[in-house]
Image (cartoon, helix red, strand yellow):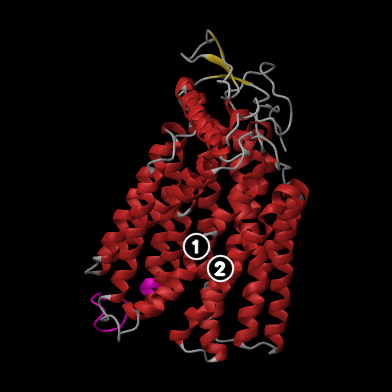
């Protein structure tokens, strides 16, 4: 049986907390992959499928909702404009609101609450009878999803071992596009009036999202609180019990004892961290990392909006693709998006973060520049343009997923959820508010030059982010979270671990 966490308690110097030495982080990082880890992936990661389903379905059913007999007095522009903006605004507000609570009250409480909010809001969207009702619950659906991003990414990175954290995080974030494929195909069936009445099919798509959320909620009950969070917040005995239970399950599964953990960390426990301390940590202690986070999120947000916001309009206006068939093209693009993180994810743990983040951003930007050039020459058809988009987004999806991984692991644990929330809200606001305002005007004019400009803007910002990553990206592959960013509660000069990958190292604060 694996040994219990080595710990020692000393009287606190103030603030009511205790100073404790523990090997819990290194015990988690040395665990071999097991069925228990798959439970974490399924229970926490599959929510991105729901997000992809939500976003895609709404875009695809906009035309049907505006038709007479839909049961909702709303225009297509209101669905893709006001409702979409409210969903984005809800996600931004939700990320910041729930992110702070996640750092303060724990990962598990919040990833249960935010999923319930999403579930209820989606179900009530299906029951929409007026425009104001639809708008209200689109905002609240986004409010729940925004909280999920902060709570889930922080929990996943704190539970997944350091040696595979990169690939797992990328694949989970990339699973958004599995939902997008499902949303595209589902909308084709749901909008077929030979199967469902005009006022029923679109409601069933939202109802299905609520049902899937309920299934995930049932699985999620078995996911424990993050032992790292418990340790820092004065619940070290509970943290030890959680890790010991995981170790017993894995030892029973594998039929032998786990090797002893190497490395310890000494921390001074505390209950909460103020907004002022979070801001000071991100912008004063880690200004280069903050610049990196800004660049990655804004770059990917604008690239995606350059392509996806005018996706349907480009196919219908320039290539005469029937509106009802655009879902097939989007499904193909969504598959390319998922294949990027799936096939490239392992390289983020082997080749390394800096090389892979910078190369995926730069390659996607350069490929989009090439697509713009071919489009301007009139050398593309609907099929070949879709193929070009697939190539661009194969790399862009891996890069975009790595943005979430990056801001999750390069800041101290006490600020992790709030850091994710902050950069997610920034990127989402840039892409979801200024992006549509810019790209809608460009891609809807029907002028080739305007669409080319939209592509070039997205490509340029992605390339800039890639260059920033080439200089500033942190080499976090194979390293404990505590090694990448020293916890604010860590005691200087005490309990240092055995180095990178030990799961216990506490590197000093850095301006990089």
Secondary structure, mark 1, is: helix
Q: Nearer the viewer, residue 486 or 168?
A: 168
* Magenta stretch secondary structure, dominant: loop
Please give left or right for residue 271 compared with residue 420 in the image. left
Residue 250 at x, y percent in the picture: 54, 36
Mark found first going from the N terminus, 1 or 2: 2
Residue 46 at x, y percent in the picture: 46, 54
Is 79 a magenta residue?
yes
Is 506 a magenta residue?
no
Please report the residue visible at 51 percent of the width from the left and 27 percent of the height from the top.
Answer: 244
What is the magenta range?
66-80
In the rendered view, tell whether residue 322 sits above or below residue 139: below
- Please indicate, yes or no, whether residue 322 appears anywhere in the rendered image: yes
Q: Nearer the viewer, residue 41 or 103?
A: 41
Residue 495 at x, y percent in the picture: 66, 18
Q: Which residue is mark 2?
A: 305
Please report the residue visible at 27 percent of the width from the left and 69 percent of the height from the top.
Answer: 131
Please give left or right for residue 437 compared with residue 460 in the image. left
Please give left or right for residue 206 compared with residue 411 in the image. left
Check whether the beta carbons of the residues at disc 1 and disc 2 lie within 8 A of each other: yes
Q: Which residue is mark 1?
A: 432
User: For the residues marked 1 and 2, what is the alpha-carbon distance in whole angstroms?
Assistant: 8 Å
């Amino acid at each position: 049986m694996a040994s219990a966490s080595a710990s020692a308690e000393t009287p606190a110097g103030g603030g009511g907390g205790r100073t404790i030495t523990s090997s819990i982080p290194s015990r988690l990082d040395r665990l071999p992959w097991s069925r228990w880890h798959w439970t974490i992936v399924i229970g926490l990661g599959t929510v991105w499928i729901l997000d992809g389903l939500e976003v895609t379905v709404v875009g695809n059913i906009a035309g049907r909702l505006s038709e007479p007999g839909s049961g909702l007095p709303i225009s297509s522009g209101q669905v893709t404009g006001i409702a979409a903006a409210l969903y984005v605004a809800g996600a931004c507000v939700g990320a910041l609101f729930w992110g702070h609570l996640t750092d303060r009250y724990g990962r598990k409480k919040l990833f249960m609450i935010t999923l319930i909010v999403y579930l209820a809001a989606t179900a009530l969207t299906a029951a929409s009878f007026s425009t104001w009702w639809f708008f209200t619950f689109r905002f609240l659906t986004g409010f729940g999803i925004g909280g999920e991003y902060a709570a889930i990414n922080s929990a996943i990175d704190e539970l997944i071992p350091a040696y595979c954290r990169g690939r797992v995080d990328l694949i989970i974030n990339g699973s958004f596009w599995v939902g997008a494929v499902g949303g595209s195909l589902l909308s084709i069936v749901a909008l077929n009036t030979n199967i469902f009445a005009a006022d029923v099919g679109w409601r069933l798509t939202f109802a299905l999202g609520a049902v899937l959320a309920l299934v995930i909620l049932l699985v999620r009950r078995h996911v424990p609180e993050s032992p790292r969070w418990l340790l820092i917040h004065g619940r070290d005995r509970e943290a030890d019990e959680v890790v010991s239970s995981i170790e017993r399950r894995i030892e029973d599964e594998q039929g032998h004892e786990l090797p002893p953990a190497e490395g310890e960390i000494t921390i001074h426990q505390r209950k909460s961290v103020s907004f002022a301390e979070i801001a000071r940590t991100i912008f004063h202690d880690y200004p280069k990392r903050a610049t990196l986070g800004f660049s990655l999120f804004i770059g990917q947000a604008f690239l995606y909006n350059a392509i996806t916001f005018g996706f349907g309009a480009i196919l219908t206006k320039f290539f005469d693709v029937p509106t009802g068939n655009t879902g097939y093209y989007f499904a193909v693009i969504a598959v390319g998006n998922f294949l990027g993180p799936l096939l490239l994810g392992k390289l983020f743990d082997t080749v390394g973060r800096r090389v892979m983040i910078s190369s995926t951003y730069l390659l996607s930007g350069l490929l989009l520049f090439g697509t713009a050039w071919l489009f301007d020459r009139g050398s593309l058809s609907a099929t070949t343009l879709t193929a070009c988009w697939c190539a661009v987004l194969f790399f862009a999806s891996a890069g975009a997923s790595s943005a979430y991984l990056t801001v999750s692991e390069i800041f101290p644990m006490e600020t992790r959820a709030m850091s994710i929330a902050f950069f997610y809200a920034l990127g989402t606001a840039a892409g979801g508010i200024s992006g549509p305002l810019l790209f809608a005007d460009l891609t809807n004019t029907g002028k080739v030059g305007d669409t080319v400009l939209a592509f070039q803007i997205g490509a340029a910002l992605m390339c800039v982010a890639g260059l920033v990553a080439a200089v500033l990206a942190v080499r976090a592959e194979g390293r404990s979270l505590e090694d990448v960013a020293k916890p604010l509660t860590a005691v200087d000069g005490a309990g240092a671990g055995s180095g990178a990958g030990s799961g216990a190292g506490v590197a000093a604060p850095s301006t990089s």
